Structure formats: C-alpha cells, structure tokens
Amino acid sequence: MSKTINQQSTIIAHITMKLSDGSAADSTKVNNKPAKIIMGDGSISPAFEQQLIGLAAGESKEFTLVAKDAFGESNPDNIYHMDRTKFSGDAPAEVGNIITFEQPGGVELPGMITEVSGASVTVDFNHPLAGQDVTFVIDVVDVE
C-alpha cells in the first residue's frame, strides 16, 4: 500500500494551473520537471495543503481555490511608481516586461511593468495570478 499525503509529507507532483476561462497559466509538465512540495513549510496556502491530504502516488485531483487561498488578493501597496531613468537598455521600461529588482540583503524581487506614462513607470510586485481564482490539477508522482 502506498503512502498517503499527511501534514508532514514531502511530495513530488506535477502541477497544472488554469485560469477561470479554462486557459492554462502554467504547468510543470511543460519541462517535465515536477515540483517538490513540503507540507507545512508555508510555501503553499493551508487551503491548498488541505486539498492534498489523503492523496497517494499515482493519484490525481483537480480543485479550484479562490484568489485569497491561491496566490492572494492583489495588494495596492505592492504597486510602485518609479522614474523611467531607473531602467536601461538591458531592462527597458516596456509594458509587460518582468524586471527583477535586487532588494537589500541580495533578495531578488520580480515586478511586472503595467504602465509607462512620460517619465513614470508603474511596476506591480504582486504575483501575476494574485486576485484570480485558480484551478489546480495535481498529479502525485511520489510521497515521502
């Protein structure tokens, strides 16, 4: 009998995320590199973890989480207006570009440029799927 997922499990699984219109947002299957999930480490929401409890290797499950339980709501405090001079030819200020900014301590934080108006550039540091309900398809590969 294979092990089932509990609150102390480490899981190897393929994860596919779909938006409410049914389009695929991302999938670990694209590069055939399953994700490693460590239950209880805070990297995924408690609501996501609850959906995994009881699954075993070889099983699949599809479920939808509302925005606050998936990637959180969009936070207006994570949207910044920056001077266009902060951008360069290597990292141009163009709508849709994702630019990585280095924070104190060497932490890198990606932000998406959402608007360029004159000398002002609007950068959104929210997760790209924040504020959206997301459907997840989990294919469990292994449970430790």
Image (tube, rainbow, N blue to C red):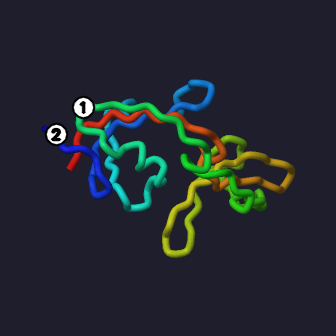
Q: Where does residue 4 sit, x and y in percent of width and height?
A: 24, 44
* Other residues around mark 1 within 10 Å, as few (<14) / some (14–19) / many (≥20): few
Question: Given the current orientation, which residue lies at the most extreme bottom position?
Answer: 105
Residue situated in front as seen by the camera: 10 or 2: 2
Question: Given the current orientation, which residue lies at the most extreme left position?
Answer: 1
Mark closer to the chain start, 2 or 1: 2
Kindly indicate whether the residue at mark 1 contacts the one at mark 2 (C-beta within 8 angstroms): yes
Q: Residue at x 57, y 69 (%)?
A: 103
Q: Residue at x 25, y 37 (%)?
A: 141
User: Along the horizontal axis of the image, is 89 left or right of 24?
Assistant: right
Please indicate, yes or no, whether residue 39 appears anywhere in the rendered image.
Answer: yes
Q: Residue at x 77, y 57 (%)?
A: 84
User: Tag 1: residue type?
Assistant: Gly
Of tags 2 and 1, which is closer to the observer? Answer: 2
Q: Where does residue 125 sit, x and y in percent of width and height?
A: 64, 56
**Residue 100 image-quadrant placement:** bottom right
Kindly identify which numbered label has been placed on residue 58: 1
Kindly identify which numbered label has been placed on residue 78: none
Q: Where does residue 140 sit, x and y in percent of width and height?
A: 29, 37
How many numbered discs sit on the rendered protein? 2
Mark 1 residue element: loop
Q: Which residue is tagged 2?
A: 2
User: Along the horizontal axis of the image, is 128 left or right of 9?
Assistant: right
Alpha carbon distance from label 2 to label 1:
9 Å
Please indicate, yes or no, whether residue 90 appears anywhere in the rendered image.
Answer: no
User: Tag 2: residue type?
Assistant: Ser
Residue situated in front as seen by the camera: 34 or 45: 45
Query: Quarter holding the N terminus?
Result: top left
- Indicate whether 137 appears above or below 95: above
